[in-house]
Image (cartoon, grey):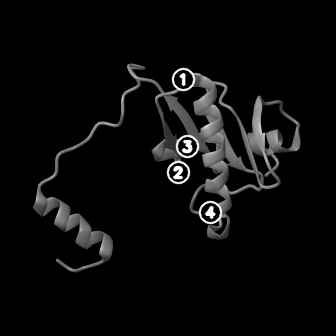
Amino acid sequence: MDDCIFCKIVKGEIPCEKIGENKDFLCFLDIKPINDGHALIIPKRHFKDLMEFPPELDKEYFAFVQEMARKVISAVKADGFNLGMNNGRAAGQIVFHQHTHLIPRFNNDNFANWPQKERTPAQLEAMRKKILGVKP
């Protein structure tokens, strides 16, 4: 896409702090990091979100994600990491080019996880049936 900021980064039209690359994927530092080492991992080809990302690239993509995670976690001496992928505006996607956030985590970094909601077993069963298309 001509106006996609990540496509422009891939083409070299916009600079980035590149930390890894191969023929299909690119990893660079997020310009508004949650923690030091927060990186974005993108396919070089444009896909709007995970739903457009071709499954035949999954193995190579996640091998690259693992490689970048090892590199970043080692460099910043993180205690763990989160992977996040926002798909759709309602999920917080801002750049509509599929990307994965690699967020190093540190003990006591005060970065809260998602709030959880309690559900009864009956509510969980009803949701399972809805997802599977089972009539109540």
Residue 125 occupies which quadrant of the picture?
bottom left
Whether residues under marks 3 and 2 lie with C-beta atoms below 8 angstroms apart, the answer is yes
Name the amino acid, label 1. Asn
> In this orientation, does residue 48 appear?
no
Specify which label sits upstream in the sequence, 4 or 1: 1
Query: What is the spatial separation of the Cα atoms under label 4 and label 1, in whole angstroms?
Result: 26 Å
Left of 71 or right of it: where is 89?
left
Q: Quick check: 55 above or below 135?
A: above
Q: Which residue is mark 3?
A: 93
Name the amino acid, label 4. Asp
Q: Which residue is mark 4?
A: 58
Give the structural element (helix, strand or loop) at label 1.
loop
Identify which residue, 15 or 19, lies in the foreground: 19
Name the amino acid, label 2. Asn
Give the structural element (helix, strand or loop) at label 3.
loop
Q: Position of residue 58 (x, y in %)?
A: 62, 63
Residue at 68%, 57% in the rendered image: 47
Please tell me the numbered disc located at residue 87: 2
Specify which label sits upstream in the sequence, 1 or 3: 1
Specify which label sits upstream in the sequence, 1 or 2: 1
Query: What is the spatial separation of the Cα atoms under label 1 and label 3, in whole angstroms?
Result: 19 Å
Whether residues under marks 1 and 2 lie with C-beta atoms below 8 angstroms apart, the answer is no
Mark 2 Cα within 10 Å, few/some/many (few <14, many 20+)?
Answer: some
Q: Which residue is mark 1?
A: 35
Specify which label sits upstream in the sequence, 3 or 2: 2
Query: What is the spatial separation of the Cα atoms under label 4 and label 3, in whole angstroms?
Result: 20 Å
Query: What is the spatial separation of the Cα atoms under label 3 and label 2, in whole angstroms?
Result: 6 Å
